[in-house]
Amino acid sequence: MDSVLNFSGGWQPSVAAAGLDVLNPATGEALARAPIGDTADVARIVAAASVAFPAWRRTPPQERIQYLFKLRALLTANLDDVARTIVLENDKTLGEAKAELARGLENIEVACGIPTLMQGYNLEDVAAGIDEIMIRQPLGVVTAITPFNFPGMIPLWFLPYAIACGNTLVVKPSERVPLTMQKLFALIEQTGIPKGVCNLVNGGKPVVDALLDHPDIRVISFVGSSAIAKYVYTRGPAAGKRVQCQGGAKKHVVVMPDADLPMTTKIVSDSAFGCAGQRYLAVSVAVTVGDAHAPFRDAITETAAALKVGSGLDPASQMGPVITAASKARIGTCIDRSLADGARSTPDGGTAAAAASTGYFLGPTILDNGRADSEMARTEFFGPVLTLVQARDLDDAIAMIAANPYGNAASIFTTNGPAARRFRYEIPAGNVGVNIGVAAPMAYFPFSGWKDSFLGVLHGQGRDAAEF
Ligand code: NAD
C-alpha cells in the first residue's frame, strides 16, 4: 500500500512510525497509509520554508504569480484525475468533486491579481513636507490546517494568496483525506516553484500542535470543527501568531408560505443532501413559516426518498456515504436521540437504508416536528439530516435563527421582496442567501462566517486574504 509523503521541494516520508489507513468511505477499502506525523517532520519542513522565505519575498509579485498561472493550467489539464482522487477518499460525487476544484481554480485566479490586491496607499503632506506610505509586506512562514470535507478546495482558499503575497507556506491537510494534496503538490512540483516555498506536512494532532507552537510560524489559517477552532484560536495566539479559524455550522433556511414550492424543494434538497450533508453550508434546519409547513414537508420527503444513494464513482449516484464508520454511528445516534425527543423521521433514512452496505452510507433523513431549542435544531450533525421546525411568522423565524450559536450562513425562500430584504438586513449570519441553497461566496468575496462559525477578524478569500 502506498504511503502518504510530505513535500518540501522533494518528497519525503514522515519520521513517525505510527499511521492510519486512508479508507474509501464507499467500500471501507484501504487506499493508502497516512502518517500521524511528528514534531520532527514539522521542524524539518518549517526550516526549509524559513530558508526559502527571504529570496521568495524579494521575488517580484508579478514573477511570483507566474507559478500560479502554471498551476492553474496544470490543474485544469488534470482536473479529472484530481477530482477522481477526491471521490476515492471522500466519496462525494464526481460532479461535486469537480465543482469544488472549480472554486479552487477561482481562488488561484483571484490571487493572480496580487500585484493590485497587495498595494498599499499613501498621502502627501500628512504634516507640512511629510508624506506617509502604507506598505503591505509578507510575514514569513504561514500555515493552513484543513478539514476532510473539501480536500481540494479548502487548501486552495489559502495557498494561492499566501505564496502570491510572498510568504512561504506549509499545508496540513486532514489525515482522513490526504491523497488529494499528494496530487496537487505533484502539480505544484511541475510548476518549478523554488524549493521550500510551498510545503506539505501530513499528520494529525501532534503535527497541528507542533505547528501551533513553532516559533518560526507567523500565521495560522484553520478550517474545521468549532471545538478544534477554539483550541487553535487559544493556543496559536498564545504563541504570538496571527490566527483565523473557520469553525462548524448549523445552516438554517426559512421557507415562507409564498415561496415557489418546486424550486424551493429542489434547492433545499440539493443543499441538505449534496455531499451527504457534509458541507459547512449544507441546509440543516428548514424553518417553515405558517402554512408553508405541510406542503413543504410532503414535497421534500418525496424528493429525498427518490434520491439515489451510492458511490460517487457511479454516475447514477446523487448522494455518497459519510466519511467514516464513526461518523455514521455518531449521526445515527443523533437521529435516535431526536426521535426519542419527539421528532418523526420521514423517510427512515438514518437506519434502514444503509444497513446492508459495507460502506458508510446513510439515507437522506428528514426529522419533522423539531423544536428550535432541541439538539436536532442546534447541534451540528454533519450528515444527510434535515430538521423541520415551524415558526409563526418571519419574526419568529429570525429569532430562532439568531438564538443558534452558529452563524456561518442562512437563506430565505420567498417571492416577497420586502421579506427578503428584511431577512438579509437582520439575520446574524455571515453568508446570506435569497432563494439560494448553498450561499458560498465567490473567491473574490470573503468567506464571512460569524459567531461560533468564525474566530478572527479577517476572513479567507479575496481582499480579506491579502489583508490577512
Ligand atoms: P476537525 O476539526 O476534526 O479537523 C480539522 C483539522 O484539525 C484537521 O486537519 C485535523 O487533523 C485537525 N485536528 C483534529 N482534531 C484535532 C485536535 N484534537 N487537535 C489539533 N488538531 C486537530 O474537522 P473535520 O471533521 O475534518 O471537518 C468537519 C468540520 O469542519 C465541520 O464542523 C464543518 O462545519 C467544519 N468546516 C467549516 C468550514 C467553514 O468554512 N466554516 C468549512 C469546512 C468545514
Image (cartoon, helix red, strand yellow):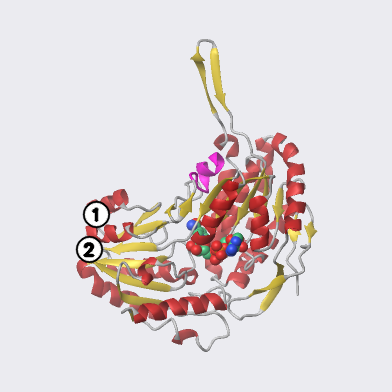
Q: Residue at x 77, y 69 (%)?
A: 17
Q: Is residue 354 above or below residue 212?
A: below
Where residue 88 sits in the image (x, y, percent)?
62, 72
Alpha-carbon neighbours of circle 1 within 10 Å: few (<14), some, or many (≥20)? some
- Asked whether the viewer can see residue 418, the reply is yes
Looking at the image, residue 87 sits to the left or right of residue 126; the answer is right
The dot on residue 272 is: none
Please report the bounds of the magenta region as a residue range: 457-468
Point out the residue furthest to the bottom here: 356
Q: Is residue 467 magenta?
A: yes
Q: Is residue 123 above or below residue 362?
A: above
The residue identified by callout 1 is: 419
Where residue 10 sits in the image (x, y, percent)?
79, 55
Q: Is residue 382 magenta?
A: no
Q: Residue at x 64, y 50 (%)?
A: 143
User: Residue 285 is drawn in which quadrant?
Assistant: bottom left
Question: Label 1 is placed on what type of residue?
Answer: Ala
Q: Secondary structure at mark 1?
A: helix
Question: Label 2 is placed on what type of residue?
Answer: Asp
Query: Which quarter shows the C terminus?
Result: top right
